[in-house]
Amino acid sequence: MSYLLVPGPATARTAVLWAAAIDESDDPGRLEVVASSGQRQRLTGWQHELEGGKRRVKIQRIELSGLAPRSRQPVELRRGGQTVARAMMGTLPERVPGLEERPFTILLGSCFAQKKDGGGNVGRTYALLPSGARPDLKVLCGDQVYLDAPSFWTIFPAVSVGELRRRLLESYLAAWTQEPGFHTLLADGPNAFTADDHDFWNNAPKGSVTAPATMIPDLRRRWLEEATSLYRAFQRPATGKPMVLDMDGLSICVGDVRVDRTESDERFMSVADLAEIRRWALGLKSPGCLVLGQVLFSEPAGRFSKHMDLGLPDFRQYAELLDALRNAPHAIVILTGDVHFGRIAVCQLLNGQEIIEVVASPLALVASFPRNEWRSAPALYPAHAAARFVQRPIATDSGYQFNGNHFATIGFSRAGGRVRMKVQAWPTENRGKPPVPARTYERWIS
């Protein structure tokens, strides 16, 4: 029996808090969230009530407003006046800081296989970050859980809905409660999530031989329903459109290329979501960050890969995404993961603006086989010719190559109409020692 408190997305004046009661039967009216500033809000009901086997989880999100910009303060979940969970709440700045100030910093991570991080390396590394690198916002861009792991699912697949539900919920609880570990990272400051395939199963929503239950149409449908319900409860509620976090000098758009993906090659997001991304890109008044669960600079999948790991270029909608981004009046930084290495690549479009793709993956590698290898971006964007789009060269930074468990921090500072971004890759396997960045990259964008 336990409780959890995890910060969600934030703005300069508001903060969302995620509260959960695990295997508790309390009336939510006995629970309240209390900030150190004295603000408090009582829980009025449960938005999600989940069960799997003998586990029961009840979840509610609440929002506190009227907060100071770029502030941090302890917050507690209290039951009958007694503290049952703690977190550190934070807000974003109203503007990108100047060069003489501490940069606005995003932590970027993906692909966390909790069973491969028994020592809690991700959380320990995060806790030991130097103060100047601590993030204002954490962006976790896919595979926060591996619902189709461990590999014994291949031999003993879940063939009943009850067993399927139990396994999926247990995977979330193992990751979200790992302390010291992943929970250490989650509980400290704002989080924004998007999904990738292992938040469902490998290559979801298509059936996969690596998750045998998904080869049975009825079980695949139920798995998708259960995994989507868990994703909405733990990570990202249904908002109807991409999440946009704005400040003077930078705009962050968190998209999703998995939840509304079709089994056919039609699309990877809803038509409405893509229209929102188009409006966001065309309306930029400063550089923007677009969060995606898969890389933008990519080749279409090969004959074998089509059955194992479809990417964005494998969908007809990919050309529409290219078109949505190509006339943006300012640079767009793609923040993504999925591919199990760290990489930075840049493409200058015909209008003179740039797309800079930053990849950070994995937080904890799920398997050592097949062997993971670093790969450069394709030579051209798009890799294959697309109607109405002139292919442009991509420059992969040769000095920023990292193939190991890590997360990245991206710091933004402004001088006049330009923004300096500084990317650092932080290995997570440090044997308890303070982390040192393994790779660093700097660039001015506008």
Image (cartoon, helix red, strand yellow):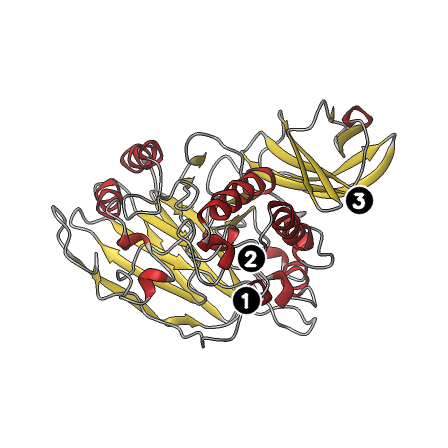
Quadrant occupied by the N terminus:
top right
Q: Earlier in the sequence, mark 2 or mark 3?
A: 3
Badge 3: residue crowd in 10 Å (few <14, some 14–19, many ≥20): few
Q: Quadrant of residue 65?
A: top right
> Disc 2, disc 1: CB below 8 Å?
yes
In the rendered structure, the answer to whether residue 321 lies left or right of residue 440 reads left
In this view, 168 is above or below 281: below
What residue type is disc 2 on?
Tyr
Residue located beneath label 1 in the image: 366
Residue type (three-letter) at the residue carrying disc 3: Ser
Q: Report x, y in % for residue 260.
A: 40, 40
- Please give left or right for residue 244 compared with residue 148 in the image: left
Q: How many numbered marks, from 0 up?
A: 3
Q: Secondary structure at mark 2?
A: loop
Q: Position of residue 31 (x, y in %)?
A: 79, 29
The CA span between labels 2 and 3 is: 23 Å
Q: Amino acid at mark 1?
A: Val
Q: Mark 3 sits on what residue?
A: 2
Q: Residue 23 in the image: x percent, y percent? A: 78, 41
Please name whichever residue, 348 or 402, is drawn nearer the observer in this view of the structure: 402
Q: Is residue 110 visible?
A: no
